Amino acid sequence: MVTLEQLAQQVESLQKQLEEAQEDRKELQRLKDVEEIQKVLHSYEYLHYPILFPEKIKLFALEMPDVSMDVGDSGVFVGKEGIETVFLKILGSARFAKGAYFMHCVTTPYIEVAADGKTARGVFMSPGLETYYEDHEHKPPECYKPGMARMRAYWCWGKYSADFIKIDGQWKIWHLKWWRDLRCDYYKSWVDDAGAVSDKASYQKRDDAKAISDQPFHKPMKFHQPYKQTERKVPLPQRPNPYDTWNDTDADWAFAGFEELIGKTEYDIEDRVW
């Protein structure tokens, strides 16, 4: 006959097994989420052919009013209209240029899924190459006729920081920022190519982009610091820390420790001590 003490021990053991199984289930789901999140950004880069730029729009959480794409020094594009503007007009104009070709890789993923499993944060390094017009100003020629624009080869390296959100069981890009570290002529180093750090090297300098800056879906630049041999590089974006649930006050987690630099155009960190 089983005594009450033995029965209590069995119940306690079963409860412990159940708790362990629940923890294993949570960990399995977290690993699956990390894999799916990586696939989302991998898809973003696999669609980095100019003619496929419009397809990138489908990867974003257009259901969210604050969905956004931050393009270096070109500002933050918010909402469905902002995302469409980036991939149909700003970057998307490249799909009409013969000879335009881009390839960016995604490496070194560092992803934190929220404890509640509803959102996630990540940073990724991205080495790449670009083939576009023969200056750093991204300016299209007078018309898109063959032979009108000579293409030039560039190295382009940077990082991404992103917030992801799960909607109806599917992970989507919620907020994405491109942190460009360098874009230099293929035949020059990033140290020697002065055009790469010129204030003209911006999509916003294009004639077709200037009018966009006044639209409600466009917000000012948050941060942009391409490599310069006369500056100390600010170590951004920061890696995400574990967190429980999304909080709007933590939206700038990638700037952790450097929040005072948001919106600045000069980054003097000479007095910092680590």
Image (cartoon, helix red, strand yellow):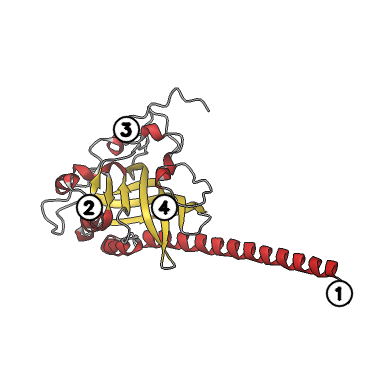
Where does label 2 land, which residue?
90
Q: Quadrant of the N terminus?
A: bottom right
Residue 67: image location, x then y, percent: 32, 54
Residue 16: image location, x then y, percent: 72, 63
Q: Earlier in the sequence, mark 4 or mark 2?
A: 2
- Disc 1 secondary structure class: loop
Q: Earlier in the sequence, mark 3 or mark 2?
A: 2
Q: Are marks 4 and 2 in contact (CB under 8 Å)?
A: no
Q: Label for residue 106?
A: none
Left or right placement of residue 43 versus residue 53 in this view: right
Left or right placement of residue 143 versus residue 123 in this view: left
Task: Calculate the distance from the C-alpha at mark 3 to the C-alpha at mark 4.
Answer: 22 Å
Where does label 1 land, which residue?
2
| Amino acid on which the number 4 mark rests in the picture | Asp
Instruction: Point out the frontmost of discs 1 and 2.
Output: 1
Q: Around disc 2, counting alpha carbons within 10 Å, would you say few (fewer than 14), some (14 to 19), or many (20 or more)? A: many
Task: Calculate the distance from the C-alpha at mark 3 to the C-alpha at mark 1.
Answer: 73 Å
Where does label 3 land, which residue?
264
Q: Around disc 1, counting alpha carbons within 10 Å, would you say few (fewer than 14), some (14 to 19), or many (20 or more)? A: few
Instruction: Point out the frontmost of discs 4 and 2.
Output: 4
Task: Calculate the distance from the C-alpha at mark 4 to the C-alpha at mark 2.
Answer: 22 Å
| Amino acid on which the number 3 mark rests in the picture | Lys
Task: Calculate the distance from the C-alpha at mark 3 to the C-alpha at mark 2.
Answer: 23 Å
- Disc 2 secondary structure class: helix
Residue 103 visible here: yes
Q: Are marks 4 and 1 in contact (CB under 8 Å)?
A: no
Where does label 4 land, which residue?
163
140 vs 151, nearest the viewer: 140
